[in-house]
Amino acid sequence: MPTDSLELRLRLRDFCRAQRRLLVLTGAGCSTASGIPAYRDHTGEWRHPQPMRFEEFSRSAAARRRYWARSAAGWTRIATARPNAAHHALARLEGLGRIQAIVTQNVDGLHSKAGSRRVIDLHGRLDRVRCLDCGARSTRAALQDRLRALNPRWRAAGHAGPDGDQQLTDRACDGFQVPDCEHCGGRLKPDVVFFGEAIPRPRLAAALRSLDRADALLVVGSSLMVFSGFRFVRDARQRGLPVAAVTLGRTRADELLDLKLSADCCDALAWLADELDAAALAEA
């Protein structure tokens, strides 16, 4: 049975027209067209080395040096990334009153750059930095300047990785200098949720309140392999809410979905926004 067809697209359009308050959950597949690689392939398996775990980062100076060296090499790609057609389509759907909130697992900030206003960055934002010891916050751009000043002759090249880093060897990271917090001399960390780290309770509570207010859940570009995303599908079903997905490949929640369109996010969402825009004009 085809997993992307006009019939399925029309069913997706009707699904979104019938549900006035959609909660949209987005994952890495929403940002790949902006040049940001995904961690997993279409089967849900890792395509890159598993990311840094919070325990390792917090206790090991060597791990922090390795992380920040890779981040310094790859930051420009994140800083210059631009929203793609999927981000813009979701912003259009919000403008049409179809989306009451976007909960994103991505940390690139591209939904906000595209103009979406009701965005919950579930896993945080890469463009922010916080101190693990005193909690002070700063911008990632300012930290990049400090990294360059401390390492003026350091150069490294590697394969692009997810979340704004480069896949470098440990040897390439040797000698890289990492600045301390300017307020307390403590350990600096990107203001994102690492593997093994809990989502801040107020942020998670806000996301779950958005689900309480929703009529349905639409998953975009996520394999849902990470529990923090999967739980929204599970909780939606427990609330009796319908769930649809637009994503390529297998998801952890395939058996829980009412409708699944296995399609490129950019193409499918741009089509959906055009259809709902035309419907809104016809109803005006």
Image (cartoon, rainbow, N blue to C red):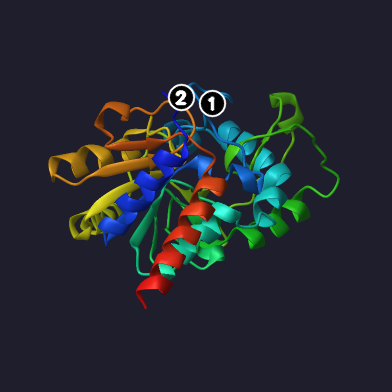
Question: What x and y, as percent, mark residue 142?
Answer: 65, 62
Out of 169 and 176, give the one closest to the viewer. Answer: 169
Residue with the mark numbered 1:
41
Q: Horizontal placement of 37 versus 136: left or right?
A: right
Confirm whether residue 174 shows in the render: no
Give the CA distance from mark 2 to mark 1.
5 Å
Out of 248 and 38, give the one closest to the viewer. Answer: 248
Quarter of the image containing the C terminus?
bottom left
Query: How many numbered marks have been drawn onto this rendered protein structure?
Result: 2
Residue 242 occupies which quadrant of the picture?
top left
Amino acid type of the residue that numbered disc 1 sits on in the rendered structure? Asp
Q: Look at the picture and state if 182 lies above or below 197.
A: below
Does dot 2 land on a helix, a strand or a loop? loop
Question: What x and y, as percent, mark residue 127?
Answer: 57, 57
Identified at 21% across, 58% down, the residue is 209
Residue with the mark numbered 2:
44
Amino acid type of the residue that numbered disc 2 sits on in the rendered structure? Gly
**CB-based contact (under 8 Å), mark 2 and mark 1:** yes
